Every structure is written in structure tokens, then in C-alpha cells.
Amino acid sequence: MSLLQVKGLSKSYNSAAKVLKDIDFQVKAGEFVSIIGPSGAGKSTLLRCINRLVDIDEGEILFDGHNVTRLNKKGLRSLRTNIGMVFQHYNLVPRLTVIENVLHGRFGYKTTFQGLFGRFTEEEKERAFFLLKKLGIAEHAYKRCDQLSGGQQQRVGICRALIQDPKLILCDEPIASLDPNSSKVIMDYLKSITSELGITCLVNLHQVEVAQNYSDRIIGLNKGEIVFDGPTIRLKSTHIENIYGMETRELITS
Ligand SMILES: Nc1ncnc2c1ncn2[C@@H]1O[C@H](COP(=O)(O)OP(=O)(O)OP(=O)(O)O)[C@@H](O)[C@H]1O
Ligand SMILES: [Mg+2]
């Protein structure tokens, strides 16, 4: 069964032109799917629609059987704990420690009081360490996040998403600020951890090659429309041309 179903989704900002047009796709539990497309294609907007950081104009989004567009406050809170987010610029609190940032991922489960006073259970702390170990950064647990490299900070960002115990992780350009080596480390972790923990992963990427190396499936967006959706092995250079239009030549020859 599909974990996520997007049906006839359209979205515009401030009643301007549509930035997403009649988007239809489904994601099965456990799939690793990349969304590729040129700048401005609507990749980030699509992720924001899925966890309802923005409201959609038309269509429906069903997540784990719930209609995302019709959730009340409580439903929205539960949606956000079930969907982890990983960002290009990590979105950590720089002056807080690694472990504190990871535990922030539990806020969705807390009352305001517990959250404000940083009340976390032993179990939550153990889980945080378990995840930091998995991502190879347990030794940095008590360092401030701003003392870590970009790649290490992104691993903290992934731990923070994972400690939510999410069903789905949405990653918006998780490696766009990283050098090739750190990018590989992050993608390797993302792929292995999500498959090990049975978490579905939807990743926006700029690099076609990275999408090809890691994804079960690729969705290609161009000007707010899906122009390719299929298993990674089916993505050919003609599809890449359709996705990127005139910018493609160098992508294909590189
Ligand atoms: N908050 C906003 N208000 C108005 N327009 C927006 C807003 N966010 C995005 N847009 C517009 O929506 C379109 C899609 O933007 P989006 O950020 O989703 O693209 P993207 O594919 O993620 O691009 P990039 O690869 O550069 O991150 C663009 O034309 C952008 O200018
Ligand atoms: Mg974007």
C-alpha cells in the first residue's frame, strides 16, 4: 500500500502563476525516491505541501491514510512527528550541543512545559546516543553544533529527524552545501539508515548522478509538472533533457 498519495495537486503563491500543476504520484512504504529538476521547478514547494508548511490550492495529499489538507491542529502535530525533515542548511541551533539538537526532534511528542524545560526521558537520551553512534558522531555529542563541519552537522540533522521515529523523511537538497566526499558520506548514511529502519525517503536533489546512484525511483519536475516518474534504471538521457531543458548538455556529457 502507498504511504503517500498525491493527487491532482496544484499550488501557486499569492495567486500568481501555478508553481505546481496537477501533480500525481504515490510513494510506497520503504521506497527511496529522488525528485530532480532545475532551479524553480517546484521541488521544495512540493515537499512543503506534503508536510503542510504551505497550503495547496487544488488536489489531495494522503499520508498514511490521512488527508493532509483536512487535518486539524492535533492531526497536523501528529503529521509533523510522522514526517522528519532534513534541510540544506541543517537548521540546527548552533549554540546548543549536538545531543540537545538531536533531542529537539522529540519536541513533537512533548507538552509545551516538558519542551521548555528540556525534559527528556532516559530512553530518549539512549535513543539519541544510539542514533549518533549509527551516524558516527557520538564522540561529538557534547560539542556545540557550530564547532562541527558541514557534513557532521548534517549527520546531526539526520539524527534529529530519525529520533522523531518518522514514517517518512523529506530531505530538501541535503548535500547541496557539502563537498563531494561529505556528500557521499551523507547519502550513504541516508540510504542505509532508512532501509535499516524501514523509513521511506523522499529527497530533492540537484545532481542527477547522485539521484541515479541512490534512488529506487526518480521523479523529474520541470516548471511545476512531472515529466518523468519511473524506476531509476529507466531514466535515459532523453528524459534528463526533458527535465532540465536547455541546461542539460553539460549534465549529460559530464
Ligand atoms: N514563498 C514563496 N513566495 C512566492 N513564490 C515562491 C515562494 N517559494 C517559492 N516560490 C516560487 O515558486 C517556484 C518554485 O520554487 P521552489 O523553491 O519550489 O523551486 P525548487 O525546485 O526547489 O528550486 P531550487 O532548485 O532553486 O531550490 C519558483 O518560481 C519560486 O520563485
Ligand atoms: Mg528548492
Image: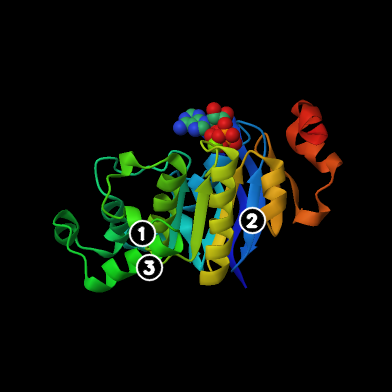
Q: Residues within 10 Å of mark 3 (few under 14, many from 20)?
A: some
Q: CA distance from mark 1 to mark 2?
A: 28 Å
- Which x, y percent locates residue 210? 67, 46
User: Mark 3 or mark 1, which is nearer the start of the sequence?
Assistant: 3
Q: Nearer the viewer, residue 219 or 76?
A: 219
Q: Residues within 10 Å of mark 2 (few under 14, many from 20)?
A: many
Q: CA distance from mark 3 to mark 2?
A: 26 Å
Q: Look at mark 2 in the image and give the residue it sits on.
A: 33
- Which x, y percent locates residue 10? 59, 43
Is residue 216 in sight in this rendering? yes
User: Mark 2 or mark 1, which is nearer the start of the sequence?
Assistant: 2
Give, as a three-letter code, the residue at label 3: Phe
From the image, state whether disc 1 or disc 2 is nearer to you.
1
From the image, state whether disc 3 or disc 2 is nearer to you.
3
Q: Which mark is residue 138?
A: 1
SS class, disc 1: helix
SS class, disc 3: helix
- Which x, y percent locates residue 110? 23, 63
Going by the image, does 214 lie left or right of 52?
A: right
Q: Which mark is residue 130?
A: 3
Disc tally is: 3
SS class, disc 2: strand
Q: Nearer the viewer, residue 89 or 42?
A: 89
Whether residue 55 is situated above or below residue 158 in the rendered picture: above
Give, as a three-letter code, the residue at label 1: Ala
Q: Regarding ligand 1, which quadrant of the image does it lie in?
A: top right
Whether residue 179 is situated above or below residue 118 in the rendered picture: above
Q: Nearer the viewer, residue 23 or 217?
A: 217
From the image, state whether disc 1 or disc 3 is nearer to you.
1
Disc 1 + disc 3, Cβ < 8 Å: no
Q: CA distance from mark 1 to mark 3?
A: 8 Å
Give, as a three-letter code, the residue at label 2: Val
